[in-house]
């Protein structure tokens, strides 16, 4: 018996906001999500990183349960949760590698001047302003296009996998991504999105 078969209607209960269903989801899927994260983060993260990613999977599922469509990917809820675990783990791997690269490139603090509180404040304000502009631009897209753009740029999910998740052909996914990218470009937000994902 699969996890999906042993927990009938679990995604509907989570969609309805039933916290007990989330507890059951974690009990039934955490070990496998942890194993996926451990395999993908091998060599770049420790057990604490794996724990964080595995927990993040269920935070994501709880918040994004409305994006699950049982008519897609064969109506297999377990497969969808495992895909989320893969996507979140790959995103975490990229982040950890990026942080390691930045640490390696960072000059010795003794040889540099520390940033002033004023410049730090300006940096935070600029970041907040850029995020606000990005959110406003994303809000102009349809829900499916937001999911497509977020998964492609934010999570690094391959386009053919996103096409499966959305239940459309890869060629249609490419066209929709191109169209969404054009709208974000006009809003001056595509560079922000690419910068967030890089």
Image: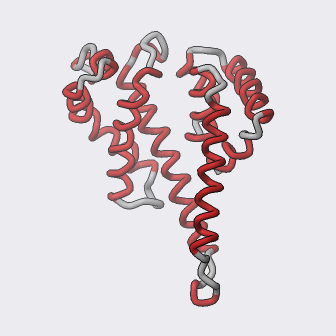
Q: Nearer the viewer, residue 186 or 13?
A: 186
Left or right: where does residue 147 sit relative to residue 13?
Answer: right
* Residue at 21% in and 34% down: 27
* Residue at 22% in and 19% down: 6
Q: Position of residue 26 (x, y in %)?
A: 25, 35
Q: Please say if 118 is above or below 196.
A: below
Q: Nearer the viewer, residue 146 or 92?
A: 146
| Residue ranking furthest to the bottom | 110
* Residue at 27% in and 14% down: 9
- Asked whether the viewer can see residue 186, the reply is yes
- State which quarter of the image contains the N terminus: top left
* Residue at 59% in and 34% down: 150
Residue 2's quadrant in the figure? top left
Q: Nearer the viewer, residue 1 or 184?
A: 184
- Asked whether the viewer can see residue 158, the reply is no
Q: Position of residue 116 (x, y in %)?
A: 60, 77
Residue 154's quadrant in the figure? top right
Q: Position of residue 119 (x, y in %)?
A: 64, 70
Residue 182's quadrant in the figure? top right
């Amino acid at each position: 018996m699969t996890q999906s078969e042993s927990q009938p209607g679990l995604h509907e209960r989570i969609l309805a906001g039933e916290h007990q269903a989330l507890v059951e989801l974690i009990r039934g899927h955490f070990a496998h999500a942890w194993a996926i994260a451990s395999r993908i983060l091998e060599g770049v993260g420790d057990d604490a990183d794996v724990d964080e990613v595995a927990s993040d999977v269920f935070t994501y599922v709880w918040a994004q349960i409305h994006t699950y469509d049982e008519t897609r990917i064969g109506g297999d809820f377990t497969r969808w949760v495992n895909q989320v675990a893969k996507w979140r783990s790959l995103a975490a791997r990229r982040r950890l590698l990026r942080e390691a690269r930045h640490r390696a490139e960072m000059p010795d603090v003794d040889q540099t001047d520390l940033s002033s509180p004023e410049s730090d404040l300006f940096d935070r304000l600029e970041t907040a302003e850029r995020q606000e502009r990005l959110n406003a631009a994303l809000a102009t897209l349809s829900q499916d296009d937001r999911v497509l753009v977020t998964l492609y740029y934010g999570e690094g999910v391959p386009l053919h996998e996103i096409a499966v998740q959305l239940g459309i052909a890869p060629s249609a996914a490419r066209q929709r991504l191109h169209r969404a990218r054009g709208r974000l470009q006009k809003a001056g937000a595509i560079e922000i999105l690419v910068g967030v994902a890089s």
